[in-house]
Amino acid sequence: MAVRRWFARLARTLGLCVLFGAALSLLPVIAWRWLPVPVTAFMLQDATTPPRDYRWTPWASIAPQAALAVIAAEDQNFLQHAGFDFAAIDQALEAAEHGRRLRGASTISQQLAKNLFLWPGRSWPRKALEAWFTTWIELLWPKRRILEVYLNVVEFGPGVWGVEAASRRYFGRAAARLSREQAALLAAVLPNPKRYRVAAPSAFVRQRQRWILGQMTALGGSAHLRALTPESPAQRSRPR
């Protein structure tokens, strides 16, 4: 009986610790729904190119073309899904089954969760935590806020974090003045910003830029962003 009571107390203690940890993990998710993000987990882990070039800029100071370009490049179903693009996941699994190159199926929301809180890699524990944070980001943030934070914290080159820093570094202008072609070029390096260069784009990057420009047009241009209103998560429209 004593052993049983000891295990029961241990189970309760572990359960409370898990609940406390889960609640604690939501604090930055809630805070960053409104506040500028001071630093991310990926920034802290990147010690290759100090000093870090990172400049937070609000949504109103980012050219709409930048948002459209990353949607076209990374997650064309961003406005429709609730954090996970299951159609893309199915396609990636099917490609893997047929021995083709493994396709990425991470949404912008998943990439943001990883960048903010986690570490690079493909382990199951990391994927589980990614799903946890992605779910809460989608529940608590409107889509426009997700895009705003993503554009501010994603890496566009070694040590260059966010669209404002990238725009000034590579084009000598503020993010608000990015052209359609410049926005597409920035988005073209996102699969691997430490390998692909905005300043010296390879043939692959130029080809990808042209593809992104075509996808931006196919999505309907800036009209595609009309659904990005600053509503609360409860008011956000879901797929029709």
Image: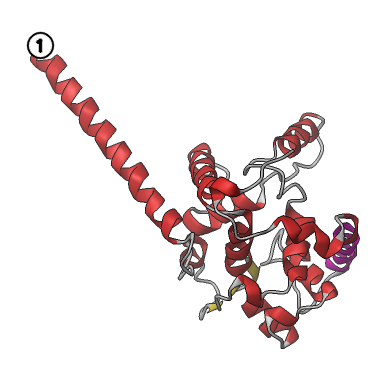
Give the left or right position of residue 167, taking residue 161 as reference.
right
Q: Which quadrant of the view contains residue 27?
A: bottom left
Query: Percent x, y for residue 98?
Result: 82, 30
Query: Percent x, y for residue 22?
Result: 36, 43
Pick the quarter of the image with the N terminus. top left
Residue 155 versus residue 83 in the image, above or below: below
Query: Percent x, y for residue 199?
Result: 76, 79
Q: Secondary structure at mark 1?
A: loop
**155 in magenta:** no
Q: Main secondary structure of the magenta part?
A: helix
Residue at (32, 37) in percent of width and height:
18
Query: Percent x, y for residue 48?
Result: 54, 72
Q: Which residues are magenta?
A: 204-216
| Residue on which disc 1 sits | 1
Q: Amino acid at mark 1?
A: Met
Give the left or right position of residue 139, taking residue 163 as reference.
left
